[in-house]
Amino acid sequence: MSDFPSFPPDFVFGAATAAFQIEGATREDGRGPSIWDTFVRRPRAVLGGDTGDVACDHYHRYREDIALLKELGVRSYRFSVSWPRVQPTGSGPFNAAGLDFYERLVDGLLDAGIEPAATLYHWDLPQALEDEGGWRNRDTAHRFADYARSVAEALADRVPRWITLNEPWCSAFLGYASGHHAPGAREGTPALAAAHHLLLGHGLSVPVLREAGAREVGITLNPDHVTPATSGPGDVAAALRAETQRNLMWTEPLLTGRYADGEDDTWGELIRHQSFRRDGDLGVIAAPLDFLGINYYTPSVVRAAPYRDEDPLSRAADDNRFEGVGIPRTRRTAMGWPVVPHTLRDLLVGLRERYGAALPPIHITENGSAENDVPAPDGAVHDTDRISYLDGHLRAVAAAIADGVDVRGYYVWSLLDNFEWAYGYGKRFGLVYVDYATQRRIPKDSYHWYQALITAQERGTTGPGLVRPVPGGRPTR
């Protein structure tokens, strides 16, 4: 019997990527510029001055990458559609050459026996829409729904699972509050408007995706497992502000049709000056979901902190009077992130306990680790730390299922080493090592480990299979 965690027989094992991080070909076949194409050319915006111009050259090498997925044995592949590749300005005519690329990708996956799962927005907003205000502008939500409809009309007959947005927290707060991601703004209320309009764009797109034939529609969030540094009231209140920003401002509107209770303390004057919310928006945002995607990497421990900017109206929207503290005696990944696998189980159980029947089935749509990978003298990449990370987190998912959480799938991040946003090519998350100079792909030891886990699961040699929870929360056989 293999020493692997065990999952229900219908559990979906997959791998994930994102368009801007792997495709390259940013100026080919009619693709328009995105906010990331603009951002990477700002001085010091990205480490090493790296760009996504070539990335992993997946646009030209997708057949090779499909072969890697087939050999890996995954049942599903999560990719993202580049909005500016299929609709260069974010409105108006669609680019036939761009859509054709995704047609070929999807058909190639199906021919390989792999189920496509499409993410419509993984941060690459067409620059033309940003020039009109980007996600601060309510019209962008409507443009997104139009884009979603057209892509689904082209692909929904072959793509069963659709994700509207990937990590809207990052789009809103890293993009419009801290400025660490494209478009690189540092704003207050406009960043909160961006957050709201992202949710509105999601809600508007859900019914049009279903009308176009999508079988499963969801959204991917990156909720944080937050704990206070001490039991003191200041740190406890700071942890609630952190949870409001990272978790509740997204899950409450999506799953309950309400805004988070703690938002007034979290944003103060910024939220009181809002004018971007309109009657009826919550009903749109809370459109029923077929699943909830969860991206998870590391937990947070926070303590109270003063405002960075004393002026309420010049304060950035991420200035919420909390700061992270270190977690002692834990290994850290190459990103500096503490590795505490059981917190993924705790997060999933906490979501189930908070939302009950309102919580849809869950897919872990990203989980993985950046490690300091280099080919050894034997030509292989021996990434034992990544294997340990994946094993621990998959065991946490199995524990959550045993505790009654309805988790249906797991997508490792990432299939390939790739462009890691503001870190450029300096951080490697892939199961497959990419030599960027030659574009040679080298499956790492973690690739073979994940392959063996999937094979053992399919053969039923991982041990007693877990039971699938019923909607009420109790597992059943």
Image (spheres, rainbow, N blue to C red):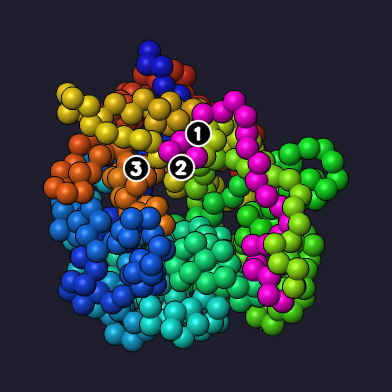
Q: CA distance from mark 3 to mark 2?
A: 9 Å
Q: Position of residue 276 (x, y in %)?
A: 65, 80
Q: Residue at 58% of width from left, 67% of height from top?
A: 177
Looking at this rendering, what residue extends furthest in the top direction?
A: 1
Indicate which disc residue 332 carries: 1
Q: Position of residue 396 (x, y in %)?
A: 54, 31
Q: Which residue is mark 3?
A: 428
Q: Is residue 178 above or below residue 447?
A: below
Looking at this rendering, what residue extends furthest in the front direction?
A: 43
Question: Could you tell me if the residues under marks 2 and 1 are in contact, i.e. CB atoms within 8 Å?
Answer: yes
Which amino acid lies under the numbered mark 2 shown in the image of this protein?
Met
Q: Is residue 225 visible?
A: no
109 or 134: nearer the eye? Answer: 134
Question: Could you tell me if the residues under marks 3 and 2 are in contact, i.e. CB atoms within 8 Å?
Answer: no
Which secondary structure dominates the residues rendered in magenta?
loop
> How many C-alpha atoms fall within 10 Å of the one at disc 1: few (<14), some, or many (≥20)?
some
Q: Residue at 65% of width from left, 67% of height from top?
A: 317
**Is residue 321 highlighted in magenta?**
yes
Which amino acid lies under the numbered mark 3 shown in the image of this protein?
Arg
Q: Is residue 380 visible?
A: yes
Under tag 1, what secondary structure? loop
> How many C-alpha atoms fall within 10 Å of the one at disc 2: few (<14), some, or many (≥20)?
some
236 or 1: nearer the eye? Answer: 236
Extent of the magenta region: 312-336
Which amino acid lies under the numbered mark 1 shown in the image of this protein?
Arg
Q: Which residue is mark 2?
A: 335
Q: CA distance from mark 3 to mark 1?
A: 14 Å
